[in-house]
Image (cartoon, helix red, strand yellow):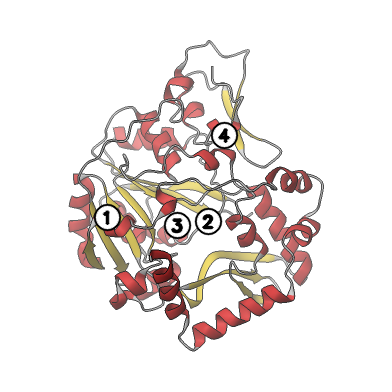
Amino acid sequence: MIEINDKSKCCGCTACMSICPLRCISMTSDDEGFLYPSVDKNKCVQCGACDKVCPIQNVVEETPFEQKAYIVRNKNREIKKASAAGGFFYNLGSYVIKSGGVVCGVVLDEAFHAVHISTDLEEDLIRFAGSKYMQSIVGNKTFAHIKTNLDKGKQVLFSGTPCQVEGLLSFLKEDYSNLITVDIVCHSVPSPMIFDKYLEYVSKKYHDTIIDVHFRDKKYSYNFPTMKLVGRKKGEFYHCGMEADPFLRAFFANICDRPSCYNCHFRKQYRRSDFTIWDCNTVAKDAPEFNDGLGATKILIHTEKGCTILKEIGNSYDLIEMQTEQIINRNSAMFKSNMKSDHRAEFFKDATVLDGYSLMQKWFPITWKHILTHKIRIFLQVIGLQDFMRLLKHKIKTK
């Protein structure tokens, strides 16, 4: 029977809940807003299936193998504009749906919580576009539905964090030729509760109800992404980057992440997914011909299946083949967990008692310095010096 005595050893992937033959495991939220398995001991028969399927208790040893690496961007400008980076996932999803398959990925629901959904409708694909900076809710039937579709012979595309992909593969137990998996280079997964607090904060501060959210909007440029908020009364009224926005500052301060993120078992180069994708924030250096302000995606392909698929859909992208070592160079998030903030416990203690406005005002107030930094970044972007500053920073780091 799975028991979570150390929360750093549970990533919330739901594999244990999904594998339980008696459905006696449910995912329940703790006081930080993260989901953990809870076992109904009156129903549990101690079969041990949940322990055997846990990807953290049964970490697959990393074994080097040949990989292919690319920088890509979608040829469709609107898809690229809506995406967090270069719009790779959209066409991959379209390829699967046109074959009669199903795509399972993450969208924001009406409460702006990240949730996994499955679809066989091409018009739903745009909902998967864009980053969602919080842990997604996989759901209690998602893995089972994927297995059902795979057993029917349908092609299935699943995207998620590395731990979610590992959880799914562990649950399935066998290698399905009709399954395509995509994971990401993951910074971490913040608490959905903290994002709820943030929305409460901005609603009160700006006297409006938020009706739409984009975590990495490209209003100014792909190289200067901002949090975009749309209000019921004001419309699109807020664009603020990590230099000032309270939630983005909390996220990058590593103060509101899931405990397992600080000791992640899945940060590695050689993975069991078919594709690993991430932001090409070095586009000005590595692919200057792609530096149009709308973004590009770095791709690491781990399987022959992935290589075959890219050949089939490659005409829908502009792409540059890269050396593997070059594309992963300086990408610490692929290999190294973030350092936990020394103030994390105090922050979450406040989060349980303070309203969202009071919490953000106490921990991440927007001061004149933040406002000035934000305006300087906009100015540098407008006059074209933002990319120059990024390249200069890169050169200093590599010396």
Q: Dot 3: what SS?
A: helix
Q: Nearer the viewer, mark 2 or mark 1?
A: 1
Q: What amino acid type should be assigned to the residue bearing mark 3?
A: Phe
In front: label 1 or label 4: 1
**Which residue is denoted by mark 1 in the rendering?**
325
SS assignment at label 2: loop
Asked if the residue under mark 3 is in contact with the one under mark 1, i.e. CB atoms within 8 Å, the reply is: no
**Mark-to-mark CA distance, 1 and 4:** 30 Å
| Mark 1 or mark 3: whose residue is earlier in sequence | 3
Residue matched to label 2: 132
- Residue 68 lies, in percent from the top left, at 22, 53
Which circle, 3 or 2, is nearer the viewer? Answer: 2
Work out whether mark 2 precedes mark 1 in sequence or the reverse, and give the earlier one.
2
Residue 7 placement (x, y as % from top left):
60, 32
Instruction: Give the Cα separation between the discs numbered 2 and 1.
Output: 28 Å
Going by the numbered disc 4, the residue's amino acid type is Ser
Q: Which residue is mark 3?
A: 128
Q: Quadrant of the C terminus?
A: bottom left
Q: Is residue 325 left or right of residue 109?
A: left
Q: Secondary structure at mark 4?
A: helix
The residue type indicated by label 2 comes to Lys
Q: Give left or right: position of 373 versus 308.
A: right
Q: CA distance from mark 1 to mark 3?
A: 29 Å
Q: Which marked residue is nearer to the observer: mark 3 or mark 4? A: 4
According to the image, label 4 marks what residue? 8
Whichever of callouts 4 and 2 sits on the residue coming sooner in the sequence is 4
Question: Which percent across, then down, holds residue 373?
Answer: 63, 77
Could you tell me which residue is drawn at 25 percent across and 55 percent down?
324
x and y, in percent, of residue 351 in the image: 75, 48
Q: Quadrant of residue 279?
A: bottom left
Kindly identify the residue that appears in the image at 64 percent across and 57 percent down. Answer: 250
Give the distance between the C-alpha atoms of the residues marked 3 and 4, in whole angstroms: 28 Å
